Image (cartoon, coloured by chain):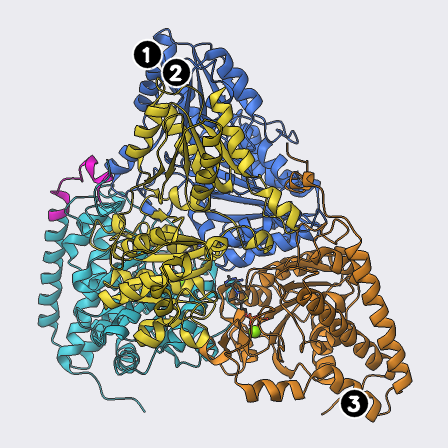
Chain colours: A orange, B cyan, C blue, D yellow
Amino acid sequence: MSPALPDRGTLTAIYRKMALIKFNDERIVRELKAGRLVTPYYSPRGQEAIPAAISMHLQDSDYITTIYRCIHDLLAKGLPARLLWAEIAGRVTGTCKGKGGTMHLTHPETGCMVTTGIVGASMPIACGLALASQVRGDGRVTVANFGDGASNIGAFHESLNLAAVWKLPVVFVCQNNLYAEHTPLRTGTSVERIADRAASYSIPGVQVDGNDPVAMYHAAGEAVERARRGGGPTLLEARTFRFNGHVLGDPGAYIPKEEYQAAQAQDPVPKFRQWLLDQKQAEAAQLDALDAELLREVDEAVAFAMSSAPPEPAELQRDVYATATA
Amino acid sequence: MSPALPDRGTLTAIYRKMALIKFNDERIVRELKAGRLVTPYYSPRGQEAIPAAISMHLQDSDYITTIYRCIHDLLAKGLPARLLWAEIAGRVTGTCKGKGGTMHLTHPETGCMVTTGIVGASMPIACGLALASQVRGDGRVTVANFGDGASNIGAFHESLNLAAVWKLPVVFVCQNNLYAEHTPLRTGTSVERIADRAASYSIPGVQVDGNDPVAMYHAAGEAVERARRGGGPTLLEARTFRFNGHVLGDPGAYIPKEEYQAAQAQDPVPKFRQWLLDQKQAEAAQLDALDAELLREVDEAVAFAMSSAPPEPAELQRDVYATATA
Amino acid sequence: MEAQAATKAAKVNILQALNWALHDAMDADPNVIAFGEEVADPEGGGIVGVTAGLSNKFGTRVRSTPISEMGFVGAAVGAAIAGMRPVAEVMLMNFTAVCMDQITNHAAKIRFMSGGQTHAPLVIRMMTGAGFGTGGQHSDLLEAWFCHTPGLKVVMPSNPADAYGLLLSSIFDEDPVIFVEHLPSYWMQGAQPTRGERIPLGQARIARAGKDVTLIGYSRSANDCAAVADKLARDGIDAEVIDLRTVQPLDMDTILASVARTGRAVVVHEAVRSFGVGAEISARLHEKLWRELKAPVQRVASAECPVPFAKNLETAFVYSHADIEAAVRQTLK
Amino acid sequence: MEAQAATKAAKVNILQALNWALHDAMDADPNVIAFGEEVADPEGGGIVGVTAGLSNKFGTRVRSTPISEMGFVGAAVGAAIAGMRPVAEVMLMNFTAVCMDQITNHAAKIRFMSGGQTHAPLVIRMMTGAGFGTGGQHSDLLEAWFCHTPGLKVVMPSNPADAYGLLLSSIFDEDPVIFVEHLPSYWMQGAQPTRGERIPLGQARIARAGKDVTLIGYSRSANDCAAVADKLARDGIDAEVIDLRTVQPLDMDTILASVARTGRAVVVHEAVRSFGVGAEISARLHEKLWRELKAPVQRVASAECPVPFAKNLETAFVYSHADIEAAVRQTLK
Ligand SMILES: Cc1ncc(C[n+]2csc(CCOP(=O)(O)OP(=O)(O)O)c2C)c(N)n1
Ligand SMILES: Cc1ncc(C[n+]2csc(CCOP(=O)(O)OP(=O)(O)O)c2C)c(N)n1
Ligand SMILES: [Mg+2]
Ligand SMILES: [Mg+2]
């Protein structure tokens, strides 16, 4: 049963988010290589379709948690690009005043609640966000993003079990890009399909092609809907690939050439763009205009960031506790 | 396919260990109630068949790790009763010089490597013991004992995954007594059959009636054999029940009366004794003599413990580091 | 029920005081939720009964959890970020070792790392303390770990009234609080708290005024300091006793004012001496009162080893009143 | 390979020295095994290359692990109890927070709790240190947690030769060792170690002899102390510099002898000041050298907050040479 296609508006909206992520990522990489930006950077290039499709089912008030590899999840959820840029550039105008940085981007107004640098930690926290929603009955859904390698750490197990026994409104999204740092899936993970681990918690486990925006849209829709109506958690395994290695500068020596090339040939962003045109779901002129507009947004975000001041030293005493320390 | 019965000798040997555990436990309870012994005590009464049957497949050189609820596992593995008694009585003649106590009984000569008070911690350590055996090729097998509640903690997940990817010679024995402290299985555990969690690691998961010594004997045999020949880990879920609550003194208010009575009616020790007689696998006189001998052993162990001296205060400086501290 | 019974009595123990604080906090604010192993009434309302009656009264705001400290302490962090006031119980202080990441890398840092956009107003309750023969993994005092982690507050009450007022303040504080309950002292009787009255965090209490020497303690050791002070009084030594109540942040104003007057100080705690809280207090006193100090600050603590099992060793492991007295006389030499 | 190349050079960096120590230890004893995330050669021989070449040479004695610190550090404990000498790599010091239980409740206590029947001769290697803009969860210095845990040793080298000799000693030590590598200093060049030569644990090194004041540091701060001492020398201040090398146990003989001579001391570390290693050293110095001290012991440390991201804040977070100099002048007032 292949469900009906989402409408044109939704399809274009998904493309818009995918392009937004791609353009920002490519610009970050450019600024880093030019030395105008200096930060460890975990590029999500290649994983754009996952959060773009999921976000179609979320409101601003819904919550997400994510990891150091995060700008795709955050931009898709709505974190303003300029605040993201100012943060990773270490400016006081950044969403965390430049104090959190690339691995801790946060923006509660758009539901970007926690970005963590500790593998696995995004999941227990997501359970807590969902618990708050359940106790308050506010109908919010929480999406917890993490990687394939993270499915081997204790926090994964404790979180899925806790979410299952409490029927929490949370969707666990394992973005399976086949590698954990330099370790291939098989070396560290004892199961073929990570989605199968859902059986340990008596919850639905779904494996989906994370690079297929339509398949991703439908899988995410079901999971979010289930959580919203009180049906409890789902484990979604979205298969994908990362094109820029673990951290920018990683030559990816551990990735077989053929595997890498095959993946690139399936780059989800140009592929989906072409599909929209082929399927007559969008016109070239429209997408060209959209791309141009997004690129302008990126330019503005970069300009905003680069023209902002760094945080003042007194920030070291602020936000440690509710009241500033001496 | 119900495999052939173990021979008479084996059946009696299993009974012997079950009775040894029961008699020691009952005497500990008596001494505690009389105030002649003072220690928190986690009675394994009702779980005797599990380690008794497993131990038939283990050598002294094989390893086990267990938890605060441990005397059944340790006595079955061969830890001398007198050393156990002296330890829980806090005497210098105890197996840990009285420094470890009831929750940390250890006896490397008989392969009793670690007894821990931290739920879940027995499993990663078991992986390490098995890793040592694998690297050395010494053919030893490690049995990791833990409870049903422990199957919800992170260490369980990390250990089974690690043992699976490295094909370690370890058998994970979940002694499912249906309660974790005062929490019934369902309240904390999101899966019906804990054995099903083996699927998350692509390893065999077997649920067995832990109160049926013969079924337990066969299930343990297969798992130990698999580990010994390099076939990797197994998750064994042994269903059982504990008759003395979580810690001695726990009135067990959270256990439905009917459930408790039904379990007691199936007390594995007298039941197995009767079965041996009914099946003509042993004569009453023989078992009476065996019981009498075991009770004498217990008396001797208690006498040895009670007549021993406590450790001297200087022990506080010893065994902290390899060389005594000032 | 337990709570009801207690209100009638003139005195109350720490268990009951804590139970009142939880009831009063949950009554006062629907954002207060509580969870941990065995905390709901079907599971006994806590293994020692601190949370008794809560789930019967507040329903699913109070939950027994699976054995998953990392999971449910992380859930406390998440719920706190969402605006709730979670009170998570990590049964014993040693078990914080299985959830340190959520406490130190997340709860403690989220306010700073988010530039103040989010924060985690949660309380993590735990029991500990030697005396019940539970051995090496059930009775450590690890407060120094948390005091050394900027972003956390550490509260350690010594009596029923303080336990009540400090827990109430901790629950309504905007920062994450590590709340340490001394298990062997649970049944200690003391004056009743005034229901609803909070005791501010970060303020020490002068338990006894004196002029010759300042004894500084918290949790169990505050009471031991008071007992020794009474004995010393009979020998004509007039000791001032400070009960810190909060170990992080330290109330340096009170400590410095007292030691500036007495010129002598002894810090006492159940944790092992080396790299413990006493070291920090000693270092600060010497830095700030170099001229006023008449003798070096003394530290009294437990032996430098894991907590032993054998009763005689366990007793020898914890500092004794004689150790405190000897340290005082050392400062008077 | 890396190792080969380096042997030809007159100087080596810390990365290479550590790599040599691991190669030499595994050559010397088949019981030495090594594992951690990415440590095997197919995964790059460590994310920075410290373990490069080991798995090619020693096969399955060297393994890349799943992301399961609790699991594989626990495995190190088990293997150590069975008589192996595991060297487990917990990539970054902050990640010890996800495996504290195996380190502090097990590795540290097993010898004591078993009455000496078992012990865990393992090494847990980890990197840390501010400077690379990795923010709040990747560059903390948490050595005080481990120093406060009886049963553990804590080693923190400051240069290539020490890194080599101390790691070799740590691997062959009979106690569990927390071995802390300073990431930003990995590429620091220094004299070559003599292959096979161990540097005993628990012995500090006088990095510079002096008579006016004693500067005490370890890891990065030992080098900063030396740099400041050179500057002070130009102003006629003759500072002695002690590189602790081992933080637990502290080499009090060396520290006390030096400060007894100089009468002044400044302790410097990258960890935050409060409840840090400096507090313990300060407390002990005042207790033991009350008469000899001419001024209160000063502490120099990082700001009391999580490690910030913005470059200017990260720089301001870590103590500066000016801070050290100011502290020295404070003791000379
Ligand atoms: C607890 C912990 N252990 C190790 C690390 C180091 N580390 C950072 S990312 C990473 C790999 C994670 O892989 P995966 O979960 O697949 O996510 P991906 O990076 O592929 O998106 C590791 C091991 C960490 N950050 N936290
Ligand atoms: C990490 C940790 N959390 C909590 C506890 C407290 N505790 C001790 S035993 C126990 C229940 C364990 O139940 P189960 O695993 O089923 O083993 P059983 O006692 O039934 O044999 C709990 C929660 C602990 N010892 N360690
Ligand atoms: Mg991955
Ligand atoms: Mg159980």
In the rendered structure, the answer to whether residue D149 lies left or right of residue D313 reads: left
C-alpha gap between disc 2 and disc 3: 82 Å
Please determine whether, in this image, residue A61 is positioned above or below residue A189: above
Q: Quadrant of residue D10?
A: bottom left
Whether the magenta-drawn stretch holds residue B314 is answered as yes
Please determine whether, in this image, residue D42 is positioned above or below residue D21: below
> Residue at position x 64%, y 31% from top?
A326
What percent of the width, then of the height, locates residue B248?
A: 34, 50
Task: For mark 2, name the chain.
Answer: C
Which label sits on residue C295? 2
Q: Secondary structure at mark 2?
A: loop
Which label sits on residue A275? 3
Residue of label 1: C333
Task: For mark 3, name the chain.
Answer: A
C-alpha gap between disc 1 and disc 3: 89 Å
> Residue at position x 21%, y 40% from top?
B315
Segment colored magenta: B304-318
In the rendered structure, the answer to whether residue A159 lies left or right of residue C292 reads: right
What percent of the width, then of the height, locates residue D82?
A: 24, 63
Question: Which sits in the foreground, C120 or D10?
Answer: D10
In the rendered structure, the answer to whether residue C241 lies left or right of residue C118 reads: left
Q: Quadrant of the N terminus of chain D?
A: bottom left
